[in-house]
Image (spheres, grey):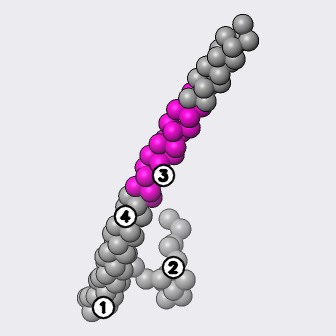
Amino acid sequence: MEADAIVQLVTVVVAAMGIVWHQQRGITQLRAEFREDNRQLREDFNTANRELREEFKSLREDHNALRDAVAQNGQRLARIEGHLGIGFPPADDPSDPEPQPG
């Protein structure tokens, strides 16, 4: 009778150890997959971030060139208006006569 009880106890303990071992192996595999996925995501993020920074740098250079071109065009327009005598006088120009009440 005692031998049967010991066999049953050993069977239960071995089965429990097998379940724990199987779960531990599964968890280890999941951790390895998680680490690999995490590494790949970080690599993809860094690549995308690098590409966006390069694109932003290019856009900034284009913006600066466009801003300079607009400033040059404004200066050209002011010179043309001055040469032709057209354009709006400054708002605080004392030579501007005030409108006569009608």
Q: Earlier in the sequence, mark 4 or mark 1?
A: 4
Report which residue position mark 2 lands on.
91
| Element assignment for label 1 | helix
- Residue shown at 37% from the left, 75% from the top: 57
Q: Which contiguous range is marked in magenta?
A: 19-42
Assign the magenta stretch its main secondary structure: helix
Per the model, the C-alpha gap separating discs 4 and 2 is 54 Å
Q: Nearer the viewer, mark 4 or mark 1?
A: 4
Viewer-proximal residue, 2 or 52? 2
Per the model, the C-alpha gap separating discs 1 and 2 is 19 Å
| Number of numbered discs overlaid on the protein picture | 4
Check disc 3 and give the amino acid type.
Arg
Question: For mark 4, does the 10 Å Cα neighbourhood hold few (<14), some (14 to 19), or many (20 or more) residues?
Answer: few
Viewer-proximal residue, 60 or 27? 27
Q: Earlier in the sequence, mark 3 or mark 1?
A: 3
Report which residue position mark 3 lands on.
35
